[in-house]
């Protein structure tokens, strides 16, 4: 019988490939959203993406796990997490109206910094001086990109930072959900509640969907769902310390798509700040693994 260590070693390359594919799908999701922000409000984009994604995820759950997997003992917590998800998505899609894809993506990667800082008051965890140092380093990277006080500063740069904060609380709240609850069940409610919350705001300012954009909305839902599923699967296949650093390949995809679609070339400050945030995140991941 194979040992767990041997299994992890054998599955590590596949886990790395899985998270890289998942990250690529999520960046494609963001690029599709940015294309749609020219014609639709961010809240309508969030609503339609989830409206399409919820039936897809429900069908997968019913086919693979059965109707029992649609049940949860944490409905109130899922409702709270849904509020965090819809707020974070709205902030991020709004940021994409004003910012290059690569810059917004880099700022969202400040999420591990918030997760570490908030784990003390919300989870009662002990954070040593090395991880606090990594947190401060990460915030320095955020400041390098945002550059408050400079002529290049724009308030829109704070929107993806708000997304990172919402995402951090969202991830921390997952610790309060029973470990027996399936990942797909959690994904379903993470899509369902934001759809419900976004519906009234989207309908008030509804813009008729053009036929040419229907494929983009479907791609948005499919890419987002696939991305989350593959990333979640990667973390189940190998230790977080191995797969988590590959999450930062999103910066490569975001830079490439930003250049191909919009002709965006990252500024030196964005590259430097992103590098600092990546180093900070990897330090936090490695310390967390220890």
Image (cartoon, grey):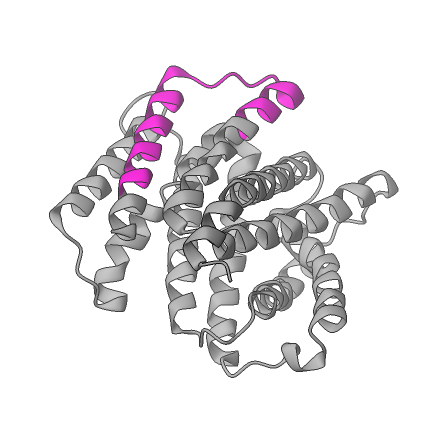
Q: Residue at x 61, y 81 (%)?
A: 71
Q: Position of residue 60 (x, y in %)?
A: 73, 65
Q: In the current view of this chain or complex, which residue is farthest to the left?
A: 129
> Relative to residue 6, is residue 210 depicted above or below?
above
Q: Position of residue 146 (x, y in %)?
A: 34, 30
The stretch in magenta equals 254-283
Q: Position of residue 145 (x, y in %)?
A: 35, 28
Residue 247 in sight from this viewpoint = yes
Q: Nearer the viewer, residue 223 or 264?
A: 223
Q: In the current view of this chain or complex, which residue is farthest to the right?
A: 211
Say whether residue 150 is left or right of residue 97.
left
Residue 53 appears in which quarter of the rendering? bottom right
Say whether residue 6 is left or right of residue 134.
right
Say whether residue 5 is left or right of residue 198.
left
Magenta stretch: dominant SS? helix
Q: Nearer the viewer, residue 50 or 99?
A: 50
> Relative to residue 23, is residue 5 depicted above or below?
below
Q: Position of residue 112 (x, y in %)?
A: 34, 47
Q: Residue at x 55, y 38 (%)?
A: 20
Residue 194 appears in which quarter of the rendering? bottom right
> Relative to residue 149, is residue 171 depicted above or below?
below
Residue 139 appears in which quarter of the rendering? top left
Residue 100 in sight from this viewpoint = no
């Amino acid at each position: 019988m194979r040992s767990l260590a041997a299994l992890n070693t054998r599955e590590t390359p596949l886990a790395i490939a899985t998270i890289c594919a998942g990250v690529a799908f999520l960046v494609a999701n963001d690029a599709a959203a940015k294309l749609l922000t020219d014609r639709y409000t961010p809240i309508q984009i969030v609503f339609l993406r989830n409206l399409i994604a919820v039936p897809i995820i429900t069908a997968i759950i019913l086919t693979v796990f059965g109707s029992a997997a649609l049940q949860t003992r944490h409905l109130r917590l899922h409702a709270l997490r849904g509020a965090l998800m819809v707020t974070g998505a709205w902030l991020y899609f709004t940021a994409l109206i004003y910012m290059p894809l690569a810059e917004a993506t880099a700022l969202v990667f400040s999420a591990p910094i918030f997760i570490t800082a908030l784990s003390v008051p919300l989870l009662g965890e002990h954070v040593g001086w090395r991880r606090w140092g990594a947190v401060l380093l990460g915030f320095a990277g955020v400041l390098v990109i945002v550059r408050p006080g400079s002529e290049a500063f724009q308030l829109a740069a704070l929107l993806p930072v708000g997304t990172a904060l919402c995402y951090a609380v969202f991830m921390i709240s997952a610790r309060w959900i029973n470990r027996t609850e399936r990942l797909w069940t959690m994904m379903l409610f993470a899509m369902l509640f934001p759809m419900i919350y976004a519906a009234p705001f989207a309908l008030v300012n509804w813009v008729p969907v053009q036929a040419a954009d229907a494929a983009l909305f479907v791609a948005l839902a499919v890419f987002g769902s696939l991305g989350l599923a593959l990333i979640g699967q990667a973390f189940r296949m190998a230790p977080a310390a191995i797969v988590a650093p590959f999450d930062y390949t999103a910066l490569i995809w975001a830079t490439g798509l930003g250049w191909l679609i919009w002709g965006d070339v990252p500024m030196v400050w964005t590259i430097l700040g992103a590098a600092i945030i990546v180093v900070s995140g990897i330090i936090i991941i490695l310390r967390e693994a220890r």
